[in-house]
Each structure stands twice: as C-alpha cells, then as structure tokens.
Image (tube, rainbow, N blue to C red):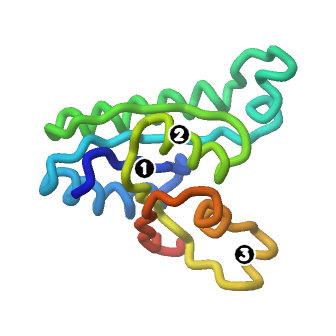
Amino acid sequence: MYRRILVPLEHSPADEAILTHVRALASRLGSSVVLLHVADGWVARNIKELDLRESEEMREDRAYLETVCARLQAEGLDADAVLAAGEPAKEIAAAAEREGCDLIAMATHGHRLLGDVVKGSTATALRHATKIPILMVRADKK
C-alpha cells in the first residue's frame, strides 16, 4: 500500500509519537522510511541565497536525524535521513515529491483555531501544498 513514508521530525519529544506508529506501519507493509527535519532558523532560511555555512543548530539537527535513522535501521527498517532548510510545509511537500514518497506521517500538537493562528500550523499548510496522503498522529502535550 505505502512503499515509501516521509516522516517530518521536529527534533522534540513529540517525534516519538509518530515514530511509534511509523515503525509498526513500515514493518507491517515493508515500507521504507525517509526521516526529514526542516531547519527553519535564520541561517537555514538564508543558507542558499547568502552562501552561508550550516549553523550549530543545523549540525545538531543533522546529528539527531542520523541517530534516529541508525536506530530504525538497527530495528531492521529501511531508513534514510534528509535535512532540509526553509519554510517547513513547502520543504516537506518538496521532499515528499523528490524522495518518491506516497505517504507523509507526522505528529501534530492538536492546536485548534486560536493556537493555529498564533503558532501557525505546518499540518494545515501542508494539506494545501501536496496531494500525497497525510497521516497525522496527535502528540501528547507536555
């Protein structure tokens, strides 16, 4: 059903909510997994235009992705890790297309209305940016 699953990670405790679901889904379906983190700090948003070097935050994000990827591989899953930079919804949609993914699986925080307006909603923006199905798993609020 799903051959390749894109999993956007925040580099936060909320990631475990989606990773739990994706492990089971990918194992059952024999799917490969692409882990993605979109760095969105000032350097990340301007790295190409200004020919900047990766920031410390981006290096930490890359190390985090590689650690999670290695953990999934050790569990027998076919997993890759990609660090992107820029606006999250746009970069997630682009990565899904580029990586040939047929499902995007992500954690959400369950903000509603006012929370989405104040904090923004990558999930809402992503729904309008791609036609690839999106599985959203609500992360615990902590």
- Say left or right for 108 vs 116: left
- Say left or right for 81 vs 61: left
Callout 1 amino acid: Val
According to the image, label 2 marks what residue?
A: 95
Task: Please tell me in which quadrant of the rendered image residue 86 appears.
Answer: top right
| Disc sitting over residue 24 in the figure | none
According to the image, label 1 marks what residue?
A: 7
x 46%, y 57%: residue: 132
Marks counted in the figure total: 3
Residue sitting at the far bottom: 113
Q: Is residue 50 above or below residue 41?
A: above
Q: Earlier in the sequence, mark 2 or mark 1?
A: 1
x 32%, y 42%: residue: 33
> Is label 3 in contact with label 1 (beta carbons under 8 Å)?
no
Callout 2 amino acid: Ala
- Say left or right for 92 vs 2: right
Disc 3 to disc 1, how far (Cα)?
21 Å
Callout 3 amino acid: Asp
According to the image, label 3 marks what residue?
A: 116
Q: Is residue 84 above or below residue 9?
A: above
